Amino acid sequence: MKRPEAHTVDAHRPLTPADLFPAGPRGRLGRNVFIHSTIDSTNLFLLNHAATAGDGAVAWAEHQTAGRGRLGRRWEAPRGSSILLSVLLIQTADSPLLSRATLLAALAACEAIETRSEARPAIRWPNDVILNDRKVGGVLAESRPITKGGQRALVIGVGLNCLQQPGHFAGELATRATSLEIATTHPVQRGALAAALLQRMDHWLDACASDASAWPLLRRAWLGRCDDIGKRVHLHHDSRSFSGTALDISEAGDLIVQLEHGGRRHFAAANTTRTA
Ligand code: BT5
């Protein structure tokens, strides 16, 4: 049974920058915070404003009219129900973060959920956050060149379903999606969860920037939460279907699969989809 505070009107209150950074910005994230009541997509907003928003900028939305998923898919969430946020990082074109951002954010999302509830979410390669075998969140990392000095704008977006009830998930989502409200017993506070998410992202960004040995740590923590390792996976890549057993992820976040017809193969997230 959920404790009564879960259902207070406050749970849907629009958030402010102080909710996201209760102690002020402490690390790389949050010197600029953009709060939108409605926007097409927080990822698109930061990609379009990369030159002016500045490294570490955070965009938050109560509602997205064109929330983006991978490979042209959509992210749907009722107003005020979710965490819908993106962060902007200005990186050199050869930065390892460009290929590892999805791993970092999915891990941070799991850790944040764990600080705020009894749930132990899993990660489904490459970008799904899973609770009770259903998708509770997703990560979308996108990057674009910016004009100055060969740098790239890396935008990492995270969507986490917080307050949705079962009736909010229609069509295919009815059997595939869940929310923290549905799947956990703790009251869901979007502000505290968003703050924890940003804190965990800041933690890993700082660790990986200051010490290259943090990457193996991050990878191990990610693998510890990954639902796929040792299991059968079905993938679509280069107009072909592949099945096999997931063995590991590479440093760049590729899934390494022992194919059922023999051989091992690396699959990059950018051009691979799951088919089951
Ligand atoms: C993702 O894509 O999971 C990445 C989602 C990233 C969303 C955030 S919100 C803030 C930021 N701004 C944006 O515009 N995007 C980011 P993908 O793995 O392609 O999953 C998309 C698929 O998940 C859809 O095709 C649906 O099947 C399903 N889906 C859509 N909305 C969902 C939801 N609320 N919960 C669970 N599944 C959902």
Image: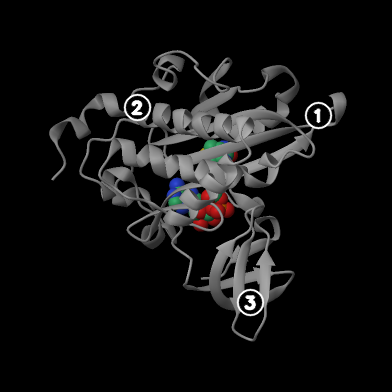
Label 1, residues with CA under 10 Å away: few <14, some 14-19, many ≥20: some
| Ligand 1 closer than 8 Å to label 3 CB | no
Residue type at mark 2 is Ala
Residue type at mark 3 is Phe
Label 2, residues with CA under 10 Å away: few <14, some 14-19, many ≥20: some
Residue that mark 2 sits on:
192
Image position, residue 31 (x, y; %): 57, 15
Secondary structure beneath dot 3 equals: strand
Q: Which residue appears at 70% of the width and 42% of the height?
A: 96
Q: Which residue appears at 67% of the width and 64% of the height?
A: 267
Picture quadrant of residue 155: top right
Q: Earlier in the sequence, mark 1 or mark 2?
A: 1
On residue 73, the disc is: none
Residue type at mark 1 is Ile
Picture quadrant of residue 154: top right
Q: Which colouring convention does the figure follow? A: one colour
Residue that mark 1 sits on:
146
Q: Earlier in the sequence, mark 1 or mark 3?
A: 1
Q: Earlier in the sequence, mark 3 or mark 2?
A: 2
Image position, residue 114 (x, y; %): 33, 41
Image position, residue 95 (x, y; %): 73, 38
Q: Which residue appears at 39% of the width and 19% of the height?
A: 19
Residue 255 visible in image: yes
Using the image, determine if residue 161 lies above or below residue 61.
below
Residue that mark 3 sits on:
242
Q: Which residue appears at 20% of the width and 44% of the height?
A: 185
User: So how many labels did they put on this image?
Assistant: 3
Q: Is residue 105 left or right of residue 135?
A: right
Secondary structure beneath dot 1 equals: loop
Q: Is there CB contact under 8 Å for labels 1 and 2?
A: no
